[in-house]
Amino acid sequence: MPGDAAHHAYRRHSLLVRITHWINVIALAALLMSGLQIFNEHPALYWGKSSYTGEPALLEVKGGLPWGKSSETGKPALVELESKFPSWMIIPSGQNLAMGRRWHFFFAWLFVINGLVYVVHSIVSRHLGRDLKPTRDDWRGIGRSIKDHLLLRQPRGEEARRYNVIQKLAYLLLIFGLFPIVVLTGWSMSPWLNSIFPGWVDLLGGRQSGRTLHFIAAWLLVSFVLVHVFEVVITGFWNNLRSMITGRYRVSPEDRS
Amino acid sequence: MTRRLHSRRRFLRQALTTASAALLAGCDALSNSSWFPKVLGVAEHLSRGAHHLLTSRRSMAQEFTEADLSPQFRSNGTANPEDAAYQALATQGFQDWKLEVDGLVGDAAQFTLAQLRAMPSRTQITRHDCVEGWSAIGKWKGVPLSHVLALVRLQPEARYVVFHCADPMWGTPEKYYESIDLEDALHPQTILAYELNDEVLPIKNGAPLRVRIERQLGYKMAKYLMRIEVVSSFTGIRGGKGGYWEDRGYEWYAGI
């Protein structure tokens, strides 16, 4: 380890950001795994207002549906999967739709409340405006930032104290794009919420389209997590992890680059 | 430095494997515990509360056009009740079938299919959303449940409507049943349907009579109706959870 005296640590993440981050980790893991349990009960995806529109399914698991072809059209789905999601990926580990739903809706509420707390806090504490909103300089340097990311070049010194522009955009897209989409498409499957304003679900293409989009959004979240964890590992795993637990983040001196 | 990295990596890998195995086992242990599913069950009350804040008693489920109809309306659960009494009624075209309506009502009554067909009717093209994840769109015709309940006069203590069905489940003597509250029972789209897609309701879809509850999932919409019982509480009935699937862990509130 280089001389610790040359390093200076500062408080990178507020307590609320740290707590909501880890609640999100738990909630998203539970939501993904219980969601795959729910998918396994009817392992097929469709586009449209219903599953039986006369068109073949978008995706189905071969032999996953006992009554034959999922769309009842006799035509194969666009995408065919070999098997359902394995037991180590689903909650509970055996087929149990009732329990899977309980997990899913509990953690969905936790996820939504947690998200609202985070957003309100971020606005009030100016975390959003100060740390996440790209500055004019950020926008100008976006080309360089993309190059830095592709070359896995890490910022040092003062630069490392703040989020880079790609990082900011990724978090903003997640918080105000993907998270609302996954919640909205989840709501689109509720027959009761359907009645708030009959027809709103058709804006997503219909209930079965909403279900398909929910599935896609879930995997986009997984891909976000993979890139996120990759970046956490290559930019100093223990430093990053500590900063999300204790809040303290060490910045290496500029001359080390 | 390299050795240290190696051991760190090995430690990380082992920790991850152990942690994920423990996590999965832990999740199953939680699911099987007596307390955790109750904690998870809080979500059902939150959803029901939030949904009722966002909608009114009269908010209507979406209705569709003939163009949206599913080519055929699939059957789920029981497709043909394995019950001698039901089969005897079916061979007679349900001429001798009667719907009993009793419980907390002023005038308990029995209605034949012809009597129900002679009552005011509602026709609606709605989407049936199954808890499993699929949806089908069908055209239903039937008598509003509110009309039948008005005929028998609800007593003031009436809170829930219980549907008793003819179909024994999976070769056991246990027959299907379901329950809804009065808000759903009196909702204009809640009908006792005797027609599907302009034809007599087929046996696979619940002949001679099934209930439609359009703001909830399919398992609420009991088929093969024999008796409607009005109660103040369903805790004393069967498993006490208000329905065949509810007794097996599904939510009583199926609006999501």
Image (cartoon, rainbow, N blue to C red):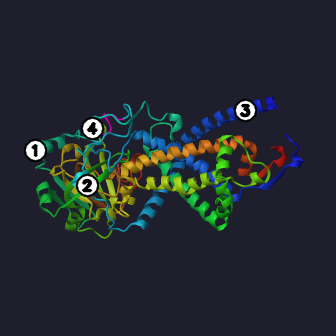
- For the stretch drawn in magenta, the main secondary structure is loop
The amino acid type, in three-letter code, at marker 3 is Arg
What is the chain identity of the residue bearing mark 3? B
Would you call the spot at circle 4 few (<14 residues within 10 Å), some (14-19), or many (20 or more)?
some
The amino acid type, in three-letter code, at marker 4 is Thr
Marks 1 & 3 on one chain: yes
Disc 3 and disc 2: Cα gap in Å? 60 Å
Q: Residue furthest bottom?
A: B156
Q: Which residue is mark 4?
A: A73
Are circles 4 and 1 on residues that touch, CB within 8 Å? Answer: no
Q: Is label 3 or label 2 in front?
A: 3
Q: Which residue is mark 3?
A: B9
For the magenta stretch, what is the residue range? A65-72
The amino acid type, in three-letter code, at marker 1 is Gln
Callout 3 secondary element: helix
Q: Nearer the viewer, residue B237 or B220?
A: B220
Q: Which residue is mark 2?
A: B211
Q: Is label 3 or label 4 in front?
A: 4
Q: Which residue is mark 1?
A: B92
Disc 4 and disc 2: Cα gap in Å? 28 Å
Taking the spot 18% from the left edge, 45% from the top edge, the residue there is B202
The amino acid type, in three-letter code, at marker 2 is Val
Q: Is residue B52 magenta?
A: no
Marks 3 & 4 on one chain: no
Q: Is label 1 or label 3 in front?
A: 3
Disc 1 and disc 3: Cα gap in Å? 75 Å
Are circles 3 and 2 on residues that touch, CB within 8 Å? Answer: no
Label whose residue precedes the other's in the sequence (3 or 2)? 3
Instruction: Tell me the quarter of the picture where residue B87 sits.
Output: top left
Callout 2 secondary element: strand
